[in-house]
Image (cartoon, rainbow, N blue to C red):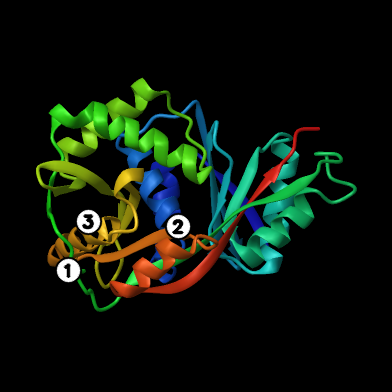
């Protein structure tokens, strides 16, 4: 196995094209983030891109966009082992690793091995996620209507996004001001829907990443958030179904990530036609 550090997001997209086409669901984060960086829609303190090759063919990939941790694509144990050793030579303080369960285990075993330059560090499991794809969509019958978010609602959207990250424990590197700027762009690009009941917005769903795939482009939904006072009424499922229907009408496949340990959201996604395709695991790496 050979591990290559790629110079830039555009070169990474080119090098990993065939690999990502074979694994569209589990490489959507890699492809959509690289695409956003390559086009200037997202900026980070720094960013790094790796591919793992076997006989010249790319069989694995990973990225880090500082201050975030490392995101792994699917790969076998040998590929993850080689990647873990290569990353350890370059980065001593990766804060977390997220990716397919088996690849994550093999990567961490190599990255934290006794002889590693990283030295002794403890690891602890974080969020376990299920990767869902919609098959036959079923719209729930609940009061209300889906509509586009507007620029006038950016303060509301920003508060909800910050609350979503706080409640789920997902890392958010942006300040509220930066989050507002980011979601202003998503409003302008028609990537956010609200669910409205009696003239009041009660839930939100967005498109967070779109990547090309051989059969059809692939849209990843997120975040999905319902205000606390309106929960357990089906509004989150309704706005998710409305957004999924719109993306399907645009000729795209639709996927999302959900907390594997939060039963209500998993039950809701299954009820409206999503099917679990894979599982990922986040692991925090404590500082030395």
Residue 16: image tag: 2
Identify the residue shown where x is 31% and y is 31%. Answer: 158
Q: How would you rate the neighbour count of disc 1 (Cα within 10 Å): few for under 14, some for 14-19, many for 20 or more?
A: few
Residue in view at x 35 percent, y 67 percent: 268
Residue 51's place in the image compared with 91, above or below, is below
Q: Nearer the viewer, residue 253 or 73?
A: 253
Question: Residue 151 placed where, x, y %?
Answer: 14, 29
Q: Where does the N terminus fall, quadrant-wise? A: bottom right
> Which comes before the other along the chain, label 3 or label 1?
1
Give percent across and percent down for residue 244: 22, 62
Residue 261 shown left or right of residue 182 in the figure: right
Numbered label attached to residue 141: 1
Viewer can see residue 16 = yes
Mark 3 touching mark 1, by CB under 8 A? no
Inspect this view and state whether residue 8 appears. no
Mark 2 and mark 1: span between their CA atoms?
A: 42 Å
Which residue occupies the extreme top position in the image?
177
Q: Most extreme residue toward the front, as rendered?
A: 229
Mark 3 → mark 1, Cα distance in angstroms: 11 Å
Residue 94 x/y as whole percent? 67, 38
Question: In the image, which disc is placed on residue 239?
Answer: 3
Q: Is residue 118 left or right of residue 185?
A: right
Seen in the picture, residue 123 relative to 131 is either above or below; the reply is above
Q: Secondary structure at mark 1?
A: loop
- Distance from the alpha carbon under mark 2 to that under mark 3: 33 Å
Give neighbour class at mark 2: few <14, some 14-19, many 20+ (Cα, 10 Å).
many
Q: From what the image shows, is residue 199 above or below residue 221?
A: above
């Amino acid at each position: 196995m050979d591990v290559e550090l790629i110079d830039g997001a555009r070169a990474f997209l080119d090098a990993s094209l065939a690999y990502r086409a074979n694994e569209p669901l589990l490489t959507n984060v890699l492809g959509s983030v690289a695409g956003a960086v390559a086009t200037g829609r997202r900026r980070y303190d720094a960013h790094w891109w790796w591919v793992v090759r076997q006989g010249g063919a790319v069989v694995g990939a990973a990225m880090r966009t500082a201050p975030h941790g490392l995101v792994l694509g699917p790969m076998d144990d040998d590929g993850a082992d080689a990647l873990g050793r290569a990353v350890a030579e370059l980065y001593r303080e990766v804060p977390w690793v997220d990716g397919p369960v088996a690849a994550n285990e093999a990567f961490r075993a190599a990255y934290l091995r006794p002889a590693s330059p990283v030295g002794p560090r403890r690891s602890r499991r974080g969020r376990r996620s299920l990767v869902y794809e919609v098959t036959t969509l079923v719209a729930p019958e609940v009061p209300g209507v889906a509509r586009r978010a507007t620029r006038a609602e950016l303060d509301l959207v920003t508060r909800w996004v910050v609350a979503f990250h706080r409640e789920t424990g997902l890392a958010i590197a942006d300040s509220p001001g930066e989050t507002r700027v980011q979601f202003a762009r998503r409003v302008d690009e028609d990537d956010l829907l609200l669910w409205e009941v009696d003239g009041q917005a009660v839930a939100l769903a967005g498109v967070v990443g779109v990547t090309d795939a051989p059969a059809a482009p692939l849209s990843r939904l997120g975040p999905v958030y319902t205000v606390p006072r309106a929960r357990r009424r089906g509004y989150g499922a309704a706005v998710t179904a409305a957004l999924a229907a719109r993306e399907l009408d645009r000729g795209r496949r639709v996927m999302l990530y959900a907390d594997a340990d939060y039963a209500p959201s998993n039950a809701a996604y299954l009820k409206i036609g999503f099917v679990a395709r894979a599982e990922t695991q986040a692991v925090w790496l404590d500082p030395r």
